[in-house]
Image (cartoon, grey):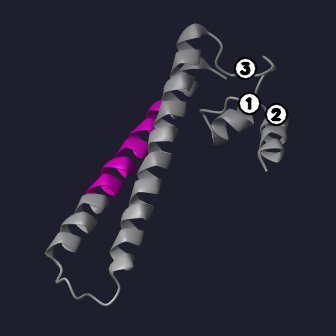
Amino acid sequence: MDVERARALLAAERDEVQKLLAETETAGREDRDSEDQQDADIDDPAQSLTQQGIDDAIAESLRNRLAALDRAQQRLADGTYGRSVQSGQPIPDARLEADPAAELTVEEAAAREAADQ
């Protein structure tokens, strides 16, 4: 994949993930603030805790995605972008277009997922 195209894809995704993270963190703060303002005798106190947990999980996932994008940008700077971090095999451009932070070939990712289950 062309270096400039890779940079553009990574930058666009980084911007989107940062925007989503900011929105999620704002929603989490609002959920916590609204819980603090509610009366003590609400019907289901677990409901607000559940939403906070969901917000926290989404934020963590987005932070992990940002870390993956950081690693991809480092590989780009190192000249190893587009190669599997596991085997060194080339990652097809179509995969990088779909997931610019891809670290493994499709086959390696499928094998890792199968092993994790």
Q: Secondary structure at mark 2?
A: helix
Residue for badge 1:
104
Residue 82: % across, % down = 69, 22
Task: Tell me whether circle 2 and circle 1 mark residues in contact (CB < 8 Å).
Answer: yes
On-image quarter of the N terminus: top right
Position of residue 43 in the picture relative to residue 4 (left or right) = left
Residue 86: % across, % down = 76, 22
Tell me what residue is drawn at x 59 percent, y 17 percent.
75
Is 56 placed above or below 31 here? above
As rendered, which of 86 and 37 lies closer to the eye? Answer: 37
Is 73 placed above or below 38 here? above
1 vs 3, front mark: 1
Q: Residue furthest top?
A: 78
Q: Residues within 10 Å of mark 1 (few under 14, many from 20)?
A: many
In the rendered structure, which amino acid carries the disc numbered 2?
A: Glu
Residue for badge 2:
108
Tell me what residue is drawn at x 74 percent, y 23 percent.
84
In the rendered structure, which amino acid carries the disc numbered 3?
A: Arg
Residue 14 falls within the magenta-colored stretch: yes
Position of residue 14 in the picture relative to residue 104 (left or right) = left
Tell me what residue is drawn at x 22 percent, y 88 percent.
41
Residue 25: % across, % down = 31, 53
Mark 1–mark 3 distance (CA, rounded to whole Å)? 8 Å
The range drawn in magenta is: 11-26
Q: Secondary structure at mark 1?
A: loop
Residue for badge 3:
83
Q: Earlier in the sequence, mark 2 or mark 3?
A: 3
Q: Quadrant location of residue 112?
A: top right
Whether residue 16 is visible, yes or no, is yes
Q: Quadrant location of residue 45?
A: bottom left
